[in-house]
Image (spheres, coloured by chain):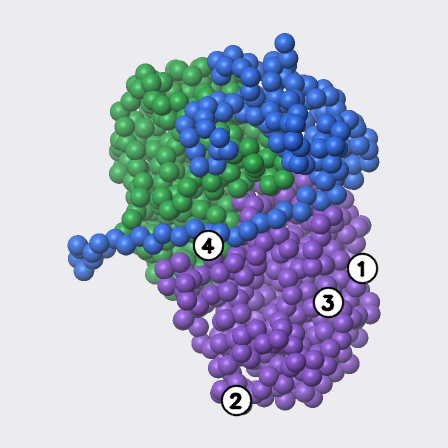
Amino acid sequence: MSDIFQNVEPMVHESRISVPYHWWAGDTASRFFIDLRDSQKIMGTRCSKCSKTYVPPRKTCPTCFTPNDEWREVASQGTLISYTVVRRHQASLPKKPPIIYGLIQLEGADTAVLHIIDELKPEDVKIGMKVQAKFSSQRKGTMFDIEYFRPVH
Amino acid sequence: MGKKRVAIVGTGQTFHKSHRPDVNGQELINEAVQRALLDADMTIQDIDAVVIGNMDHFEGINYVDCWSVDGSGGVMRPIIKLTTGGTTGSTLAIGGYHMIASGMFEKVLVIGWEKNSESDTTGAITTAFDPVWDRLVFAGAISGLAAEAQSYMAKYGATDKDGARVSVRDRKHACNNPHAQLRKEVTIEEVLASPMLADPIHLLDVCPRTDGACAVIMACEGVAERIAPQPDWIWATANRHTYSYLNDATYGELDSMADASKELFSKAGIKDPRKELDVIEMYQPYSFAGIIWIEDMGIAPRGKGAEYIWSGATDMGGELPINPSGGVIACNPIGATGLIRCAEAALQVMGKAEERQVPDVSLALSTGFGGCFWTDTILHGKNKPAF
Amino acid sequence: MDRAAIIGVGMTKIEANKVRETFADMAWEAVNKALADAGMNIGDIDNVITTSNDFWDGRTISCMAVGDASGVKYKNVSCVEGDGTFGAFYGLSRTLSGSYGTTLVTAHSKGSESVSSLITNASFDPIYDRAFGMDMVSSAAMQANAYLHRTKTTAEQMALVSVKNHGNALLNPYAQLPMKLTVDDVLQSEMIADPLHKLDCSPVSDGCCAIIIANEERATRYAGNPVWIKGVSFCSDSFFLGDRDLSRAPSLSEAAKKAYQMAGISNPAMEISLAEVYDAFTHQELMWIEALGLAGDGEAAKELEKGSYTIKGSLPVNPSGGLLSGHPVIAAGLIRIAEAVKQIRGNAGDYQVDGVRLALAQGVNGLCGQSHCVWILGKDK
């Protein structure tokens, strides 16, 4: 830019976008959360055409693009597919780091769920280890009705 | 004009409602997509690419093209997101058109959607405007529109009764459209007696907030004729997103509509749109636009828009029916709205508009409005364009 | 595909914080540089595509901010949301459709104006995933672990990508982070999310890029030196991370396959002279190289160690320094295209690769590279 802007103090206007959101979970996710809250059951939807069970449940099968036709309960334990340990604090984090995040493929499911892994030291996390859901004592119909997953001993 | 001619061969819409608690966003999208596929007798495997859009801050989901693939059919397919505010829906249609006209794809699925019930619409729209200059003082959708109506009224002596006449027309038309959200006739008196939102705009002069999705399938010449007995041929598109700041706009006229429609008609060799067009589906978010913007289109002379509306010419059965679907005043899932106009124009050309069908449509116009007084226009024809 | 060419490119310097410049200022600079590069003026531009993201920009209809500066006023215009390679794809479509002879494409963002972690957390599903608080970095870290586990690639090998790209950036005056590093420097930098150290991650950046696309007839009308578009394709994987095999990128392979077909390329590793890939994180450069078919499955790290991907190597990757040396989201992919153009024309300055005939540029949308766009550019028609 030309000389006329020399020595101009750069002004910064602070703001934030504050738009409230309330996302309708929809019938499919609502059923999942009701079962989780009331019965500590983890339910998936199944596409009989593709022989795939989706957790989190999907109303339609992303593979063949037809409605999933069946609900199926999956186990509350499964295999750790991958993980990370977040060390540096970020604005989006729900608590102080370190936090272990994992992708868990529950027994009976063909897809993995995202969740927090706890009750072990970060250096002890291994891909392939067995983990088990610890259900929250105060369940409200959210993913945190599973407090976290912990190693199966 | 294009390298390849392009036609709409199928459309699908949700039954638009104020809120849809039974589905999340991608499930809502899926309803429209499945209906469009059914309408065109196709499966998702027939689709070469997907174009999708909405307005991010209405649902608060970043990278919607990526997030929505379960519902849109975008898994292991090319999917691209376009967004331009209120014009998003028409922008998407224009996008689908160019992607096929380029010769790179034969069949493209175009999806516009919005779940306006999931956020504060005015709060989200306010963030459209420049954070330093416009946002604090003059923002939200209605203030700009009220300023436009006031300027027009001051210039030509129109009244809020003129605006009400447009609202009465659209709300009556909506009763013929099972997909419209608001399907209730109103009288001029009821419009004028409804709460004043921003002088001179009454509650019944403006569009509602809606949850809805629309999907349109386009195909190239050679393919389109095999899919649809009467494809809706896209003759031309033109748009103007003229302004960056609200305070730049010319109030009382819509420059972007004047420029875009002029370009559109000249591309298609249309000299007298009032006589040559058979139906218009206009993105008309409030009633006064139904008077002002038809002047910008050249349908009525400056200052004579209201007179033309009062003559009944734009009612069903009139010389040039406008918004047989009931238009935006009856239904406004914003990211879908422009695409619904396009789909409704296509239904008219294809002869599939059922109760809201205008007889013998051979040329239709659909438009989009949004952003900062921006306009998109699309010309639809029964016959293949000769150019 | 009909012939079309890129006839002008322009970009701002990539910086951590362009506090003196608005979105419009950045666009103005990039657009005017592209016009000058092509020997055109704004009147020669038939239509415009801007590329932006409402979340990063903190405004809905974010394209509004750069309209004036991109010369849209009396023109047809549209806006793509996502990476600049996708914006360029739509620009190419509008050119090839016959509607417009020339298309100006811009892409901008200012990471400095917002909080990256919150913006990218908003890419997660609001019902099932978002509350966990993950973001672009933590999801990429999870992907890195899956990739390392499957291919036995090591943290040292990942670090070598950082050493190479920051080193290349020393030669690029537009790069934000030119650095002479060692593998130890990378491994000793702060651990952000295992296994990603700070120097495995691209920085938060501000920047804008503009390119001009022309159809065959218009491509040679101006002073610029046209670079021909040989192939371009894009493809998306599943959304949920748990639906995908995070250690692989099948959507990138699919996009590349189509782009190679269009370009008549049967052996990409032999035929492509250089690649500008989307190295937002060190492991991603290796993953993308493999998914693009430029190295065998799990072989990229070994090739890297052999020096194949340096500027003087057999297949230079990110000679510009890549995203690791400057990552203005949205603009980043368009910058990859612009860098490929400069290399093909032979005006990449100190990081010029010898004898470039075919170059690849890649862009990414979504978490862990869900959706990819691949461009093949060439010297010859």
Report the amino acid beneath label 1: Pro
Q: Are marks 2 and 4 in contact (CB under 8 Å)?
A: no
Q: Earlier in the sequence, mark 2 or mark 3?
A: 2
Q: Which residue is mark 2?
A: B156
Circle 4 chain = C
Element type at mark 4: loop
Q: Which residue is mark 1?
A: B229
Q: Are marks 2 and 3 on the same chain?
A: yes
Q: Earlier in the sequence, mark 1 or mark 3?
A: 3
Report the amino acid beneath label 3: Leu
Tint of chain B? purple
Q: CA distance from mark 4 to mark 3?
A: 30 Å
Image coordinates for residue C317, horizontal then vertical, percent: 40, 28
Q: Residues within 10 Å of mark 3 (few under 14, many from 20)?
A: many
Mark 1 or 4, closer to the camera: 4
Q: Are marks 4 and 3 on the same chain?
A: no
Q: Which mark is residue B182?
A: 3
